[in-house]
């Protein structure tokens, strides 16, 4: 292989910044370059909440976990592997491997087994989660719901006048929104107060954003009312700490965004029961 | 007994109207009348959310269930009985009874048993609920929280301009608020839409209020953010159905009520975890 | 009504003695007498473990609970009522009733509701229990399994040389076996030791059998191996207390009974998973 | 480092053969050789069921999981690391690492956090498991119980006349017993029948023992009665398949072993409830 690149590794949805990559464009760029690198994608915070097309985008390796869009506790690492990647792994003699070897897992899976102790409770949960997502709500409705909820969150942030960490609105994530706190405000203080006073769990700024940003997660099992509670809670926490944002402005903007959405779709919680 | 009344039966908190009785005043009136009737109180929708004082008010029989302020699934009927009521039940030969007899239960309870199959899972749950209410949050904080949440709900209803079923604000319940819908609006339609579109479960008008009122429950495990979600959801459902209330007015009023409350108490959900 | 009897009340399976009534014979006797009394049957410890035929035996009222053959926690009272009993209840003006009135429940049930707070968790559990009993194992297999397990238990008791409380083997219950302890042995001591040393929960003698008998429950979710553990545990407890029964005799007899049964039916635990 | 060995890796309890290593002797041998190799021990199938002394034996790295002696579902990998191993890892610049780096985990752990998404449900479960093992039953009692149960299992296997895979009785494991099936018998057939007919899950022969051995697990939450059910079930499965072992011989031998043990310790299941 004269070409030095073996694989392109992409995080589909970047949780620290709240940015979603345009996978179709990445695939097109690779095709345009005539490059045969493997395409590997981390979908941990997007799968089952944001549209992802392994086949259409010819993704070779998809990595995911159970604890986000799949609405389960942490405990499963999920891997999707293309035939091309499988063949490459089987043919390639270079790197010795044991724990990372796919072959024993696939061999056992064929007869309904697993080479190590499987997390059976999680597998039962995964079956139910897939029923809820695919059969009861429908994946297209799931994606539309997360678009709607994310637009509500973004409307609130704009009303507050706080800058998004994600600078290009076209790449704003539908599962997480990272927001910069005003200068002089320690975002970790805000998180602590929201958690202790309102049982509201926000994400902190990661890496160089530590102390300068907070993150609002809006993926998985979630509906409009929970988003309103979240936005209202952030405002209450900000007011308690004397931050200069107009209390209620985000709440109204968020609610207005939901109103305008005109959606008439049964919410997932109910669909699961009926 | 020349006096024809044997007992005064009171519902401490009336769920269909959202009215809380002034138990201290009732006790005083009975004392002033020199009446020896038993005082029996239904606390199903108040106990552990609204202050209740069996000893101080010399209540003879207190009836409660597990599924409201005690935050458990339905399944336990709970009875508090005064020594006077016990003595009366033991001495009174008039009415034959078996299932309603307290004696077998008390006899078995003394040795840690129960005369019928006990709902053991509920008893474990009750032990944990009491830990949360008494040890972790503290009953006074629980009562203060429900006062605060109820004031938020009432502020929202006033902002909507809708009449309360409870006409005297001094008796408004801190666990449930019944609201009259505008003339011409079927409250059952509103309930149905809120449930199906927003997974929001409101109570219907009961008896002659059927179709003319809806009820907002705010007892048990609940915090400010959940109340904001509830108020916001009612507004969205009303807007969807074209009801003439100003969307966002209740949400803002509710949030403002929480802001003004100045409370700095750790919320119960978090206290239970830490 | 010149005839003084309004109803015949039968306990299908008597838990204190371990006797099952011959319901078909009782129905025949009532028919032979040309009597129109209602036939009411308590099936608490038999339904879903021992064959019961409400329609064929023209039973008017069937009473059951959730916590035995239906394999759920205690919490549901279940009532089956014939059209004849319904008509009688509706037409009969004699006895005032409220809590005991069927009409409100039936009216609400028709539209998927319940007049009081329903035990929803139990209803979900009941749906799953019925799937396990009817779809996965099949009721006939369930009854055959309980016959097989009961025969194992009875073989053990005979090997011990201890008398059954149930004197006629033809009426021995397939869900519970009551056994007399040898003279001079307090059965409550045996129970206490089995519970504390072996985590084995046996039933005590009830009423006049208190202290003189113990009861082995074998209904609901149970298989051969659990019965062997139970029989072995009783023997260990007896040996610890110095009772004069031959340790191992019951265990061998029970196992031999299972061997001879020739059954090749998949056990229920597994059926439920696969 | 002139010495070619950096570490001695030991599996404390070998699940495929049912052999427990003598860790004290291994430590002594290493000391006698004056060797400074790290001592790393896999305790997956021994910890919390068989005595293990990290400090006394100066073990540098202990590896365990949640799903065996700790009585939890699979989901936690647990690592114990000595100060010496920590210092070595910190000082050694040779091997780049990220996922395998202990430093981020220790840094976050110090402030109650975790660098990745923690399996919180498992951590709550672990807290309860430790309460049960250490506070309620007591580790010494836990180890004594597993010795007692293992002796019952071994008595049964000897009665059957089947050879142990573990040839030296002094190293027989107290958590798992591997048994050779008679020549001509496929142990996988036995496993399949035991699972499908008796819901009894046995382990298969691993590697070259595949088809020639089966394994009886007896670790974690287990008591005498469950062992009797297991032994009785193996005998029933063998009898169904026509294997030449005397039905009941193992059951009797196992029960006799329990009888002779003279233990009067409250079983763990009960201790946890009381």
Image: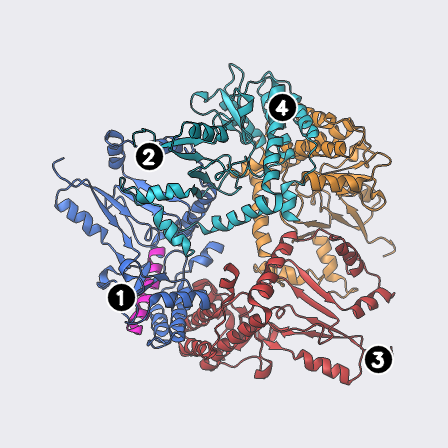
Chain colours: A red, B blue, C cyan, D orange
Q: Quadrant of the N terminus of chain C?
A: top left
- Do the residues indicated by labels 4 and 3 lie within the same chain of the protein? no
Residue D157 appears anywhere in the view: yes
Q: Position of residue C151 (x, y in %)?
A: 61, 27
Q: Which residue is mark 4?
A: C155
B252 vs A165, left or right, is left
Label 1 SS:
loop
Q: Nearer the viewer, residue D262 or C77?
A: C77
Dot 2, how many residues are within 10 Å of its Cα: few (below 14), some (14-19), or many (20+)?
Answer: some
Using the image, name the chain to which the residue with label 3 belongs: A
| Labels 3 & 1 near each other (Cβ < 8 A) | no
Of badges 1 and 4, the one in the foreground is: 4
Q: Is residue D138 above or below residue B190?
A: above
- Residue annotated with mark 2: B102
Q: Is residue D200 rendered to the left or right of residue B213?
A: right
Residue on which the image places disc 3: A3
- Name the foreground residue: C224 vs A69: C224
Asked if the residues shown at circle 2 and circle 4 are in contact, with their CB atoms under 8 angstroms apart, the answer is: no
Q: Is the residue at mark 1 from the same chain as the one at mark 4?
A: no
- The residue tagged 1 is B164
Q: Where does the magenta region start and end?
A: B142-161
The tag earlier along the polypeptide, 1 or 2, is: 2
Host chain of mark 1? B
Residue B248 lies, with reference to residue B196, above or below; the image says below
How far apart, in angstroms, are the residues tagged by discs 2 and 4? 41 Å
Q: Secondary structure at mark 4?
A: helix
What is the chain identity of the residue bearing mark 2?
A: B
Disc 1 to disc 2, C-alpha distance:
40 Å
Q: Would you call the spot at circle 3 few (<14 residues within 10 Å), some (14-19), or many (20 or more)?
A: few
């Amino acid at each position: 292989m004269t070409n030095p690149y073996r694989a392109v590794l992409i995080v589909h949805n970047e949780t620290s910044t709240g940015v979603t990559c345009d996978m179709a464009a990445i695939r097109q760029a690779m095709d345009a370059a005539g490059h045969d690198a493997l395409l590997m994608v981390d979908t941990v915070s997007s799968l089952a909440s944001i549209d992802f097309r392994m086949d259409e985008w010819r993704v070779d390796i998809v990595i995911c976990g159970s604890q986000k869009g799949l609405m389960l506790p942490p405990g499963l690492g999920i891997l999707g592997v293309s035939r091309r990647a499988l063949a490459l792994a089987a043919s390639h003699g270079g790197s010795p491997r044991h724990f990372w070897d796919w072959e024993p897992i696939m061999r056992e899976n064929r007869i309904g087994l697993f080479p190590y102790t499987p997390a059976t409770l999680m597998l039962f949960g995964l079956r139910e989660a897939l029923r809820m997502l695919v059969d009861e709500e429908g994946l297209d409705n799931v994606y539309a719901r997360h678009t709607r909820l994310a637009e509500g969150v973004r409307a609130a942030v704009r009303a507050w006048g706080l800058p998004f960490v994600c600078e290009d609105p076209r790449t704003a994530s539908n599962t997480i929104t990272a927001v910069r706190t005003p200068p002089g405000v320690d975002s970790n203080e805000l998180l602590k107060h929201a958690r202790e006073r309102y049982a509201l769990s926000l994400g902190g700024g990661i890496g160089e954003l530590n102390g300068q940003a907070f993150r609002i997660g809006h993926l998985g099992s979630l509906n409009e009312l929970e988003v309103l509670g979240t936005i209202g809670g952030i405002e209450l926490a900000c007011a308690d700490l004397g931050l200069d944002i107009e209390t209620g402005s985000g709440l109204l903007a968020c609610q207005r965004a939901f109103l305008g959405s005109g959606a008439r779709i049964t919410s997932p919680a109910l669909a699961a029961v009926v």
